[in-house]
Image (tube, helix red, strand yellow):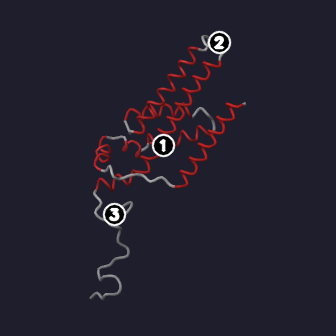
Amino acid sequence: MSTSFGPPDDFNPYRAPDSMGEPAEAGETEAERIRRQYLSHEASVKSIGSLFLLGGLMMVLGIGAAVFASARPAADLILLVALGTLGLVQCIVAVGLSRLKPWARIVGAFFCGLGMLWIPIGTLINLYFLYLLLGKKGKYIFSPEYRTIIDQTPHVRYRTSIIVWIFVLILVVTLLMGIGAALFL
């Protein structure tokens, strides 16, 4: 007999939980549950795309500056064209990563492999990027099944922490100060 106080008679404190992972919100569909489960990984991969875009744009702009500053641009033309092409390809891959295109996952992994040559920091960062792109979750978020889930759940969005926005602001201000100092020196 159960009273209004305490657990029901059939309560078993040693029973396994009914679900695995995060608890589902009331009225949440299976697609929404899956999307929320992989949302932080999806945001991390899209952040790699943003970093690739920043690096590609800096490379292309740096090539442009090198052409104007070089006393003998014809001698360095092959190197400049190769690096400029690499920068443009990196920008294209960045867009593909931000749209979770499967081909961008493979080319992005190639760029991460190149990034591992910058020992030790580049190696550590790019190892993490490779995990994000090539791991089990990375493989799934680039799959056609996950694309269908994204199409079914456009209202599910990732919310960036205020701490991340503060670090981004500090990074942008630092970059702008560095560019300003380089222009006026």
Q: Is residue 68 above or below residue 181?
A: above
What secondary structure is marked by label 1?
helix
Which marked residue is nearer to the observer: mark 1 or mark 2?
Answer: 2
Q: Residues within 10 Å of mark 2 (few under 14, many from 20)?
A: few
Who's the residue at 30% across and 88% down the image? 3
Of the numbered discs 1 and 3, the one sitting upstream in the chain is 3
Q: Which residue is mark 2?
A: 72
- For the residue labelled by badge 3, is the local secondary structure a helix, a strand or a loop? loop
Q: Are marks 1 and 3 in contact (CB under 8 Å)?
A: no
Q: Label 3, on which residue?
A: 25
Quadrant where the N terminus is found in the figure:
bottom left
Q: Amino acid at mark 1?
A: Ser
Q: Nearer the viewer, residue 115 or 168?
A: 168
| Residue under the image location 53 percent in, 19 percent down | 82
Q: Residues within 10 Å of mark 3 (few under 14, many from 20)?
A: few
Answer with mark 1 or mark 2, whichever residue precedes in sequence: 1
Residue 115 location, quadrant: top right
Amino acid type of the residue that numbered disc 2 sits on in the rendered structure? Arg
Q: Amino acid at mark 3?
A: Glu
Q: CA distance from mark 1 to mark 2?
A: 38 Å
Question: What residue would you read off at disc 1?
Answer: 47
